[in-house]
């Protein structure tokens, strides 16, 4: 039996979709445990590019069960669009998608509150506007709408109307929202009725598969530094994106997970606001963005880019208990004469090696870099470690030694085969 988790080791967008898709080949279940339609996982199937937001990346594998766990916030409208998109590419999803009964449901009200709150606060967090934060607020306020509520349409309609009244009463939405949201309410009820048939006891499903010794893959969304507890708070998402979220978000105890793979991009990116110590504002930053096509899969926003942050990666290894690393987008660095890795921060004249010490003041730190000579030859599509240029191997080995976790997978291009197993 093998239960494996794939976790974003930075600020999200590390290329998890491809690695999950690859590992899902031998998995009977792929399960997500947190987040919602804020995530955007890009998977290539031959020449077809599929961007998934809520459905776990295993959906492209015939017969693979995809669980949307209780720790997720599920948007029925987005989910139906996604199911139709996947089906339009010729994939049959029937019987493959399962929504936890106690997963929370994102409604048009939550999306409207998310957008209105950000607008009122001058886009303070730079959220994706998908209603993620407000839905988690309702969950912890114990007034949320859950998967089980989709099973009774009359009751769901009442809850939706009550939620709208309370949002207006609390001043989160204007009175005019009643008219403005009507169309979206119809669409929501329509989609809710359709996805209701996917709601089931996912807890028993995952445990029974685990007890039978089947391979299970757990797919994290966003990244470690966007985790609500361990990330760069308040510039974070509203869920537990680290491996700790698995036990609450699926009801699967962490001691059942044998392998925890951290996905680290060979450089860093961040969307939204909040500090990123190695962010580049120069030509190199633009070059990373252009070559890496660093534009959001969910919102299309340009991502902020910078050199690999070793201090952050080391923190990520610790907080997630990473057993191995998958290094992605290595080939993007082919085009640089000099490549840098941040090995410490400097703040108030002091050298800092532990990110946790300065998470609350990350905007005040200066990166201290170690410089590497670029290999300046193509690594795109290389499938064997020994075929990599010596300088590339040195870069990978340095990262592995620095964070104390072996780099076992290296992605050298977007295609399924552009991968090295080390
Ligand atoms: P929210 O999750 O939409 O509330 O956004 C909170 C913060 O997390 C913002 O900075 C977003 O840009 C960021 N964020 C949310 N989802 C993702 C993702 O999938 N990749 C990268 N950043 C994300």
Image (spheres, rainbow, N blue to C red):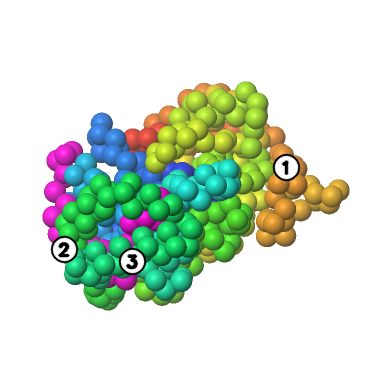
Tell me the CA gap for discs 3 and 1.
50 Å
For the point 47% across and 35% down, the residue is: 301
Q: Is residue 419 visible?
A: no
Magenta stretch containing residue 91, yes or no?
Answer: yes
In this picture, is 149 found above or below 82? below
Which mark is on residue 52?
Answer: none
> In the rendered view of the protein, which quadrant contains the N terminus?
bottom left
Residues at marks 1 and 2, CA–CA distance in whole angstroms: 51 Å
Residue at image location 84% in from the left, 50% down from the top:
348
Label 2, on which residue? 197
Badges 1 and 2: C-beta atoms under 8 Å apart?
A: no
| Residue 148 vertical placement versus 53 (above, below) | below
Taking the image as shown, residue 308 lies to the left or right of residue 109, namely right
Depth check, mark 3 against mark 1: the one in front is 3
Residue span colored magenta: 86-112
Q: Residues within 10 Å of mark 2 (few under 14, many from 20)?
A: some
User: Residue 421 placed where, x, y %?
Assistant: 41, 46
For the residue pair 391 and 127, the one nearer the viewer reads as 127
Q: Secondary structure at mark 3?
A: helix
Q: Is label 1 in a helix, a strand or a loop? A: strand
Question: Which numbered dot is residue 367?
Answer: 1
Position of residue 162 relative to residue 184, above or below, is below
Q: Earlier in the sequence, mark 3 or mark 1?
A: 3
SS label for mark 2: helix
- Residue at (71, 39) in percent of width and height: 370
Q: Is residue 154 magenta?
A: no
Residue 162 tag number: 3
């Amino acid at each position: 039996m093998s239960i494996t988790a794939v976790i974003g080791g930075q600020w999200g967008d590390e290329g998890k979709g491809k690695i999950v898709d690859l590992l899902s080949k031998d998995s009977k279940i792929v399960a997500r445990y947190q987040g919602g339609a804020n995530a955007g996982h890009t998977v290539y199937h031959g020449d077809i590019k599929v961007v998934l937001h809520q459905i776990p990346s295993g959906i492209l594998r015939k017969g693979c069960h995809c669980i949307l766990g209780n720790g997720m916030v599920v948007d029925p409208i987005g989910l139906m669009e996604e199911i139709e998109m996947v089906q339009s590419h010729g994939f049959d999803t029937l019987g493959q998608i399962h929504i936890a009964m106690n997963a929370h449901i994102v409604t048009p009200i939550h999306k409207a509150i998310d957008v209105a709150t950000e607008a009122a606060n001058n886009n303070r967090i730079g959220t994706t506007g998908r209603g993620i934060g407000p839905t988690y607020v309702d969950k912890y306020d114990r007034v949320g709408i859950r998967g089980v509520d989709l099973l009774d349409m009359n009751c769901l309609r009442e809850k939706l109307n009550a939620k709208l009244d309370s949002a207006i009463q609390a001043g989160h939405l204007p009175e005019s929202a009643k008219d403005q949201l009507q169309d979206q309410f119809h669409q929501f009820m329509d989609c809710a009725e359709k996805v209701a048939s996917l709601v089931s006891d996912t807890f028993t499903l995952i445990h029974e598969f685990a007890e039978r010794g089947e391979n299970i893959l757990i797919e994290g969304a966003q990244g470690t530094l966007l985790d609500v507890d361990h990330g760069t708070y308040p510039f974070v998402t509203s869920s537990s994106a680290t491996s700790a979220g698995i036990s609450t978000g699926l009801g699967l105890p962490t001691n059942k997970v044998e392998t925890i793979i951290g996905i680290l991009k060979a450089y860093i990116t961040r969307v939204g606001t909040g500090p990123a110590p190695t962010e580049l504002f120069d030509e190199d930053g633009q070059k990373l963005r252009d070559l890496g096509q660093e534009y959001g899969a969910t919102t299309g926003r340009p991502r902020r880019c910078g050199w690999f942050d070793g201090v952050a990666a080391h923190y990520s290894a610790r907080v997630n208990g990473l057993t191995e690393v998958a290094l992605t987008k290595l080939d993007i660095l082919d085009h640089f004469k000099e490549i840098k890795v941040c090995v410490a921060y400097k703040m108030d004249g002091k050298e800092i090696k532990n990110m946790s010490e300065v998470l609350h003041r990350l905007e005040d730190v200066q990166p201290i870099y170690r410089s590497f000579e670029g290999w300046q030859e193509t690594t795109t599509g290389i499938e064997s470690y020994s075929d990599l240029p010596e300088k590339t191997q040195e870069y990978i080995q340095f990262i592995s030694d620095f964070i104390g976790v072996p780099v076992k997978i290296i992605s050298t291009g977007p295609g399924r085969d552009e991968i090295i197993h080390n």
